[in-house]
Amino acid sequence: MTGVDDPLVVHTPGDREIVLSRLFEAPAPLVFAAFTRPELLVRWYGARGWRLAECDVDLRVGGRWRFVSLGPEGARMVQAGVYRQIEPPHRLVCTELFDDQSYPGETLVSHEFYEVAGRTTVTTTLLYATAQGRDTVLRYPMARGVGQSYTRLADLLRSTTTTRGEQP
């Protein structure tokens, strides 16, 4: 599941997993920072038409994160979780639960950041509590939204690396 304009690759290797992968033209420390620093997250997180209105990050194992997103026609979405593993700039693992969730249980979200020659592939594995939960999410336009969000991230990384150097 990928296209010319959307370089996001989506796989479903197991009945409870969705794996998303995309290459970014930026070093891993900067990409990791974009996933963990609120001042960067608010600049890219969310599908087209959505924006982060609140972004709380307590980046420590056991620390909580909470995002409030606002979308078209007053739509509001709240998601939150707990950081389980933090290994900058290579790995970030957390739980995720939406306030208005339509499937059971928390999702375990693992981001892997793999850099080669200044380019970083981000591979995100979403492990759902149940196969039914994963199937529910696959019926939503989740992959399209993540693809749009990652396009915004690519633009941010490009402007950050060209105007301020490559340090986060």
Image (tube, rainbow, N blue to C red):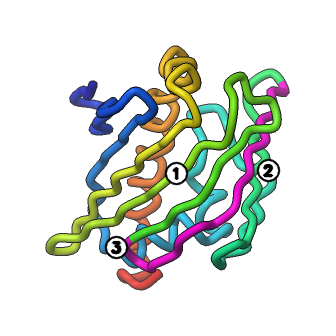
Question: Could you tell me which secondary element the residue under label 2 belongs to?
Answer: strand
Alpha-carbon distance for marks 3 and 2?
26 Å
Residues 16 and 136: in front is: 16
Name the kind of residue labelled 2 in the image: Ala
Q: Amino acid at mark 3?
A: Ala
The residue labelled by disc 2 is: 53
x then y, percent, for residue 116: 16, 70
Which badge, 3 or 2, comes first in the chain's sequence?
3
Kindly check if marks 3 and 1 are in contact, taking CB atoms under 8 A apart as contact: no
Q: Residues within 10 Å of mark 1 (few under 14, many from 20)?
A: many
Task: Please give the residue where the numbered disc 1 appears in the rendered image.
Answer: 109
Estimate the x, y position of residue 168 in percent, counting from the top left.
47, 81
Instruction: Tell me the SS state at disc 3.
Output: helix
Q: Position of residue 64 (x, y in %)?
A: 75, 65
Q: Earlier in the sequence, mark 3 or mark 1?
A: 3
Q: CA distance from mark 3 to mark 1?
A: 18 Å
> Residue furthest toward the left?
117
Distance from label 2 to label 1 (Cα)?
22 Å
User: What secondary structure do most residues of the magenta stretch adopt?
Assistant: strand
> Mark 3 — residue?
28
